[in-house]
Image (cartoon, helix red, strand yellow):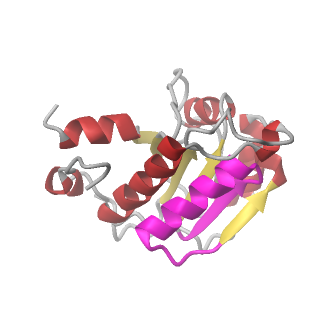
Amino acid sequence: QAGGVSLPWDRVQKYGDPHKGFGHLKQLLILRHAKSDWKADFDSDHGRPLAKRGIRAARLMGRFISKLDLQPDLILSSTAVRARATSELASQSGRWSCPMVLCDEFYGSSPSRVLSVVQAQDATHSRLLLTGHEPTWSGLVGALTGGGDPRMPTAALARVDLPIEDWSDLRAGVGTLHWLVSPKLLLAMGSGG
């Protein structure tokens, strides 16, 4: 249940990980930070916290990832309070045991700068969760998948499959967008809509 709405996990699970067992495939889970609280007391944009709605959404996305058996091997998160909190809440709610690395490079960044951080990751990690900001995250999904202009609302999550063995082989245009979901979509599915 999420906010009193029952989610259709049986329908969600069948769209899990069809590539399980293929060692050559890497995956990126690209998560935009959840809704922030513009009315809160914060010193700078970097310090803006999550709103109550954002807290609920971050937890929902963590459970969604776990229900699909897509727990990340490593979380790379922007250092901004709202992105870090989104990663932490998703991880707690999903009961993941992976480490989280905070990346200064993800705040006020560009898709190419994010790609360079990902390219430096250890090949033993098959699935990375990246948590960050717009417009970089929409641009990143578009760049990885060869174009388009995907819309990444707050707490939206994109799964990009990559036919590479090593993160250093990551290039623009090599990925396949498997799905892109938002908390609003998941809740609509749970309400029968």
Say which quarter of the image contains residue 48: top right
Would you place residue 159 above or below residue 165 in this image? above
x and y percentages locating residue 82 in the rendered image: 67, 48
Q: Is residue 92 left or right of residue 108?
A: left
Q: Residue at x 67, y 59 (%)?
A: 76
Which quarter of the figure is the N terminus placed in?
bottom left
Asked if residue 82 lies in the magenta stretch, the reply is yes
Residue 68 visible within the image: yes
Please identify the quarter of the rendering in which residue 75 is found: bottom right
**Where are the magenta residues, as a range?**
73-99
In this rendering, would 12 be left or right of 84? Answer: left
- Residue at point 57% right, 35% down? 173
Indicate the quadrant where residue 185 lies.
top left
* Extreme residue toward the right, this view: 43
Spot occupied by residue 127 in the image (x, y as percentages of width and height): 52, 63
Residue nearer the viewer, 142 or 62? 62
Q: Residue furthest bottom?
A: 97
Task: Point out residue 148 in the picture as x, y percentages from the top left corner.
Answer: 52, 21
Taking the image as shown, residue 96 lies to the left or right of residue 144, namely: left
| Image quarter in which the C terminus is found | top left
Does the image show residue 181? no
Q: Is residue 67 magenta?
A: no
Please state the horizontal and vertical placement of residue 186, each as a whole percent of the image. Answer: 30, 42
